[in-house]
Image (cartoon, coloured by chain):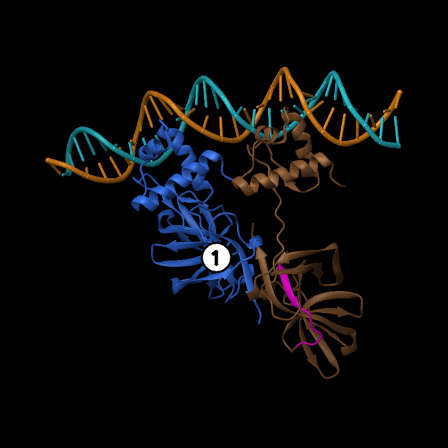
Chain colours: A blue, B brown, C orange, D cyan
Amino acid sequence: MPLTPRQQQVLDCLRQHAADFGRAPTLDGLCRLLGLRSRGSLHKHVQALIAEGLVEPLNGRHRGIHLVTQSTDENTLPLLGKIAAGRPIEALPQPDTIEIPPRLRTSRPCYVLQVTGDSMAEAGILDGDFVVIERRETARNGEIVAALIRGEETTLKRIIQEPGQVTLVPANRGLLPVVYAPEEVAIQGVLVGQMRAYH
Amino acid sequence: MPLTPRQQQVLDCLRQHAADFGRAPTLDGLCRLLGLRSRGSLHKHVQALIAEGLVEPLNGRHRGIHLVTQSTDENTLPLLGKIAAGRPIEALPQPDTIEIPPRLRTSRPCYVLQVTGDSMAEAGILDGDFVVIERRETARNGEIVAALIRGEETTLKRIIQEPGQVTLVPANRGLLPVVYAPEEVAIQGVLVGQMRAYH
DNA sequence: CTGGAGGAGAACGAATCGAGAACGATCCAC
DNA sequence: GTGGATCGTTCTCGATTCGTTCTCCTCCAG
C-alpha cells in the first residue's frame, strides 16, 4: 500500500535526521521539524510506517524510531544463513543475497534462510530448501514461523498461541509438539514462500 | 476495446505525473492538468482505464490511481498450465508467464506448471506448487519427470527405466507405482525447480 | 432522432490530517 | 535508588480534502 504524502514526508525527515545525527529523533523533535504541534498526530504517521515495514516498532523506548535497511535491488533478498530445529541460525560470515520472484515475498521486509533437517518435511519443506521469511513479531495461529526460543535456538515450526502457552508443532511423525511459556518464544518472522532446486 | 482520445490523454498525463513526482495525483490535480473543472467527469475516464486493466482500482484511497506495471524481465518463463496425475496438462487459454530466479532453472529451455493434487506430497511437492520443468526427452532413473502416457494424460512422477519396462512412482502412501511399456511413456521434461507461496 | 463521448456541478461518505488531553513508561541528574 | 522531566501511547474531536455517485447538459456522427 502506498504512502500518503504526509507519511512520505515523515519518512524523508527520518532519513535526513539519521544521516545528520546518526540516531533517531524524539517525537517532539520530529514535530518541530515538520511544523506539527501534536505528538499524537505524528505518532499515527509513525504507526503507519511501522505497518508498512519501513520502520522498526519502538515499544516505549525513547528515540526508538529506527529505519529498516531496505535492499536496493527489487528482486533480491538477504540470505541470512541456515535454520534448523535445535540450533541457532547459522549465520553466514558475510550476508549473501539471493534472487526471489515477487510472487514468493510480500511487500514488507523479508529475508531468506536455508533449511537444514526434516522437521517440517510433511509440510513440504525439505532439507536444503530456501524459505522466505517476512520480518514480523506476531503471527496468526497455524502460520509457520521462525521463532527464537529462550534466546538460544531458532527453529521453523507451525505455531499455536493460546492463553498462557505457545505450542510449536513440527510436521514430522517422528517429532512431537513442544509447549512453551509465551515469554520463552520470540517470533522472528513468518513463512511466506519456499523454493527448491533439484539440480 | 480501444481507448477514446480523452482516455488516452488521461493515461498519458498519469504516466507523466508518475515520472515527475513518483506518486499518483489527486483527481483535483489531474483536473487542473487536463483543464477540466469537474472531478466527476474525470472519474468516468479513470473508471474506463480500470476496466481496461491499465490502472489499479482506487477503493476510496486518496491518491489511489496507480499504473499497472508490466514486467518484461529476462527471468520469466512461460507458465503453460496445470499438471495433475491422471489428466492432460490443463493448458491456460493464453500462455502466461511467471518470474523464476535463475537458481531454480537450468541453462536449457524450461517452462513452468502448477501442480494440482497430492500425488507427490511426500517428495515435498504440494497442491498449488509451481514446478520448473526442463524441456527434455530423456531422464535418468530417480529423476522426477513430466510424462505423457499413451498420448492421453500427463503426470508428474519419479521415473525408473529398466529394460522392457518403465515404472512411474508416486510419492504418496495412498498411491501405487504403475508399470508401463517403454513406448507408452513419453518424457516431456524433467523437474529442476519448485516453489510455493504461502500468502 | 438516437446514442455515445465528454463535461459541469451538487451531494455524500470516507480518508487524511491535525490539536489536545490524559496516562504510564522511560530516562537522567542528583 | 529516587524523583521529576521527558517521552511514547492512546484517546476524542474537529476540519479539510478527496473519491464516488448522481443528474443534467452539450456536441456530433450515423
Quadrant assignment, res A46: top left
Residue A34 versus residue B115 in the image, above or below? above
Please provide percent x and percent y for residue B61.
56, 33
Q: Is residue A1 shown to the viewer in this render? A: no
Residue hosting label 1:
A77
Name the residue rendered at 50%, 59% in the picture.
A131
Mark 1 is surrounded, within 10 Å at the Cα level, by few (under 14), some (14 to 19) or many (20 or more) other residues, namely: many
Is B83 drawn above or below residue A5 in the view shown?
below
Q: Is residue A152 visible?
A: yes
User: Does residue A61 appear left or right of residue A174 in this picture?
Assistant: left
Amino acid, disc 1: Leu
Report the quarter where the N terminus of chain B lies. top right
On the rendered structure, is B168 left or right of A147?
right
The image quadrant that residue B58 belongs to is top right
| Percent position of residue B193, x then y | 60, 65
Q: Where's residue A8, x and y in %?
A: 45, 38
In reply to whether residue B154 is colored magenta, the answer given is: no
Residue B36 image position (x, y, % from top left):
64, 26
Identify the secondary structure beneath mark 1.
strand
The residues colored magenta run B129-139
Q: At 71% across and 63% down in the image, what residue appears?
A: B85
Tag 1 subunit: A
Residue closest to the eye, B47 or A122: B47
Rendered view: B186 above or below A61? below
Q: Is residue A155 above or below residue B5?
A: below
Looking at the rendering, which quadrant does residue A57 occupy? top left
Count of residue discs: 1
